[in-house]
Image (spheres, rainbow, N blue to C red):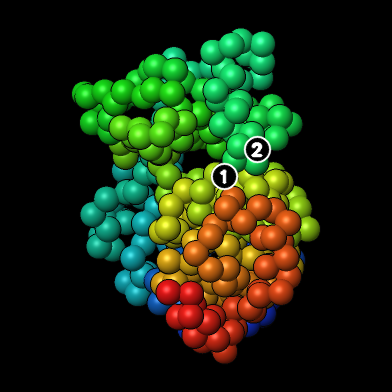
């Protein structure tokens, strides 16, 4: 028996099949929108609602509340061959020696541990603008932000800060990076906890124009976060942009990937946090056609209201919110295969 055949008999028929993948309602969190994805070849699964991940062995353990040996017995009782999968146990500190041996006998060299990553260390010398409204040293930073269309309410609500002189560690934790005259933005998780920071210099000819927080493999990185997603996820539509200023141009509806490349981790965050029915507008810079198409295509596999938006060489912050919204209304293209082809053709005229 195939693992997905077992799932179909146990938790119900999948809604639809994509190449090598089946979608079910999650048996763990009870969601009803078929966000439980199972890869047919590897047996790996992920729920884009509760974030549970695993494989056939971990499924049986959690679903039937049994040990690894008990899960193995259930799999074999349904003629599901463990050898067909790359079985990895996810962070189970309760495994006995015999249970570990069972996994090793099945060709598993290591037991994967999910290592907790932490937010990068904050740079020195930063202050919150909301705490320094009457401080003359903060005036150039307020003026700069106002010139970029950022409102006072946004400065307060997003805890925007500033650094006159400070430093942070490089990723190797042995060398320092000097930061001067920069505004600092923070990204938060769904509980409002700090996750990441990045800066933008207000100097005309800065040594460092922008800096995304450096970190090692144990620090949360740019690829692990989406700026403002914790707020935008609750709105009636979401606009994906490249930078913080572009995101803030759209207020509570804008999110930022902090770069042209959108990582697989960021795509998972977008899929997990944005409801499948919520319209998503991709407003990344127009010089990133390949990235725009890739992102649109990947999001469209789960969210059917995904649009790409041709908008010329100006980004959202250059255009301003009124004109940018007008462009979205008039230029949006649904990310169907036909729509993507049309988008590619239109982009050629902007070069």
Residue where numbered disc 2 is placed: 150
Q: Position of residue 278 (x, y in %)?
A: 73, 64
Q: What is the spatial separation of the Cα atoms under label 2 and label 1, in whole angstroms?
A: 8 Å
Q: Position of residue 292 (x, y in %)?
A: 49, 69
Residue 32 occupies quadrant: bottom right
Element under disc 1: helix
**In the image: residue 151, left or right of residue 284:** right
- Which residue is rendered at x = 66% and y = 19% of the image? 130
Q: Position of residue 207 (x, y in %)?
A: 31, 32
Q: From this view, report whether residue 82 is shown above or below residue 252.
A: below
Q: Quadrant of the C terminus?
A: bottom left
- Which residue is rendered at x = 57% and y = 89% of the image? 338
Residue where numbered disc 1 is placed: 245
Element under disc 2: loop
**In the image: residue 9, left or right of residue 100:** right
Q: Position of residue 330 (x, y in %)?
A: 71, 74
Q: From this view, report whether residue 224 is shown above or below residue 262.
A: above
For the residue pair 18 and 77, the one nearer the viewer reads as: 18
For the residue pair 15 and 106, the one nearer the viewer reads as: 15
Q: Residues within 10 Å of mark 1 (few under 14, many from 20)?
A: many
Residue 218 occupies quadrant: top left
For the residue pair 182 and 334, the one nearer the viewer reads as: 182
**In the image: residue 329, left or right of residue 259:** right
- Which residue is rendered at x = 26% and y = 23% of the image? 176
């Amino acid at each position: 028996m195939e693992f997905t055949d077992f799932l179909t008999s146990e938790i119900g028929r999948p809604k639809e099949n994509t190449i090598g993948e089946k979608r079910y309602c999650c048996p763990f969190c009870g969601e009803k929108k078929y966000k439980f994805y199972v890869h047919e070849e590897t047996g790996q699964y992920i729920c884009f609602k509760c974030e549970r991940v695993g494989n056939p062995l971990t499924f049986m353990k959690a679903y039937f509340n049994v040990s690894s040996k008990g899960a193995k017995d259930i799999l074999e009782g349904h003629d599901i061959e463990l050898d067909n999968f790359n079985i990895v146990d996810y962070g189970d500190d309760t495994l006995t020696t015999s249970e570990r041996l069972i996994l090793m006998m099945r060709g598993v060299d290591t037991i994967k541990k999910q290592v907790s990553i932490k937010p990068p260390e904050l740079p020195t010398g930063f202050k919150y603008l909301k705490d320094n409204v009457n401080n003359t040293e903060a005036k150039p930073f307020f003026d700069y932000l106002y010139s970029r269309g950022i409102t006072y309410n946004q400065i307060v609500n997003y805890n925007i800060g500033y650094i006159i002189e400070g430093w942070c560690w490089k990723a190797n934790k042995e060398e320092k990076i000097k930061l001067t005259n920069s505004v600092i933005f923070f990204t938060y998780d769904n509980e409002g906890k700090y996750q990441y920071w990045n800066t933008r210099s207000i100097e005309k000819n800065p040594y460092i124009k922008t800096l995304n927080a450096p970190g090692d493999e144990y620090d949360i990185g740019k690829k692990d976060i989406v700026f403002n997603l914790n707020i935008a996820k609750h709105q009636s539509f979401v606009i994906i942009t490249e930078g913080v200023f572009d995101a803030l141009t759209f207020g509570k509806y804008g999110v930022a990937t902090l770069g042209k490349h959108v990582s697989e981790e960021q795509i998972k965050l977008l899929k997990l946090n944005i409801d499948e029915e919520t319209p998503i507008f991709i407003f990344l810079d127009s010089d990133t056609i390949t990235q725009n198409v890739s992102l649109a295509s990947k999001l469209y596999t789960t969210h059917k209201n995904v649009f790409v938006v041709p908008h010329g060489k100006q980004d959202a912050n250059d255009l301003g919110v009124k004109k940018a919204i007008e462009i979205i209304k008039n230029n949006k293209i649904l990310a169907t295969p036909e729509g993507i082809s049309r988008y590619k053709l239109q982009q050629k005229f902007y070069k």
